[in-house]
Amino acid sequence: MRLAAPLRVLPVAVGHGAGALRARVGGVPARWRRRMLFVLALLALLAGVYFAWFRDSSIVAVQRVTVTGITTSDAPRIRARLIAAAESMTTLHVDKQALMDALPTTAAVADLRITTSFPHGMAIQVIQSSAVAVLVAPGRRIAVAADGSLLTGVRAGSVPAINVGALPSSGRLGRGRALTLVAAAAAAPAPLRSRIARIRQLPVKGLVAYIEAGPQVILGDSTRLAAKWAVAAAVLADPDSRGASYVDVSLPERPVAGGVSVPQPDPAQQGQPPAAAPGTGTPGAGGPGTGAAATGTPGAGAQSPPGATASGTAGTPGTGTPGTGTPGTGTPGAGYPGGAGTGTSP
């Protein structure tokens, strides 16, 4: 009997398979992993070059600056400061806060919109602050923004006046009564704000706005100002509140329009008869009698309801010897009880 040849192990084949398995760790061939590592290293190098040198290099330095949107009297000074700050930057590295810090403290600037054009151009659009009130100090008036910044060179226009003892030297209002009044003006809707003559703070009423040719608006404390103004605007627009001397919205859930003249109702429109004049009765006259004196019992006027015709009751015939008294009659009265008729015999 011939035995079959024993199985031969092929170490080369087995070794080749193990190497292939090790080369495909995670399912990625070794050559692809090497390429990925190379790309990542290259990107890291480029990022380092960009942030460490290129974005702040003179190759992309700002050289042309245009500034628009300034209409105040100090526009030349603002423009010069912005250009100087911008020329220290590059088109790839713009610092907006540095530009804002370069502005004068009295500049009426709310925001800056910056665009760059590679490699050397920058455009700055200045968004000016709008006045919400005007501060009135002895001998001086100056517009003020919602954040309390004094707007030098800005025309206030139709905004509420706020009386202050003196203007702040820092160019901005600090915490206090004046800033509270400015916040009350800023919270008012723009169409309504232009109709407010002034705003004051009174001991009992709190914040009070005086509408030109209109009522006072009592706001109370400085909380929920936007909600209070929204309610006040709705009340003022309501025809039923026309003629009110004040509108109290210190509690916006319960607004009150006071001082409204309420017309008296017309009785004819409510089904009530008009009031009648009191009725009167003319005394009855007794006819002449003979004999003993005759006496007549006075006639009693019947009480009539309002508006009905009243009539006098005839007097009782007089008794005598031999004559009789003529019955007295009362003239009809209107409205109130009629007069009593009387008859007498001489």
Image (spheres, rainbow, N blue to C red):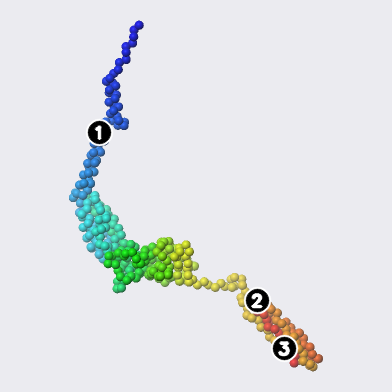
Q: Looking at the image, do the residues carrying marks 3 and 1 touch, with CB atoms under 8 Å apart?
A: no
Closer to us: 302 or 41: 41
Camera-side residue of 21 and 205:
205
* Marks 3, 1: nearer the viewer: 1
81 lies above or below 325: above
Would you say 41 lies left or right of 330 here?
Answer: left
Q: Amino acid at mark 3?
A: Ala
Name which residue type carries label 2. Answer: Pro
* Left or right: 14 as drawn, with respect to 324: left
260 relative to 67 in the view: left or right: right
Query: Percent x, y for residue 147?
Result: 33, 62
For mark 1, what is the residue?
Answer: 34
What residue do we see at 34% from left, 9% from top? 3
Q: CA distance from mark 1 to mark 2?
A: 116 Å
Q: Position of residue 303 (x, y in %)?
A: 69, 78
Q: Is residue 338 above or below residue 83?
A: below
Give the crowd class for mark 3: few <14, some 14-19, many >=20 residues within 10 Å.
some
Of the numbered discs in the image, which one, if any, rests on residue 267? none
Reading the image, the residue beneath label 3 is 285
The residue tagged with tag 2: helix, strand or loop?
loop
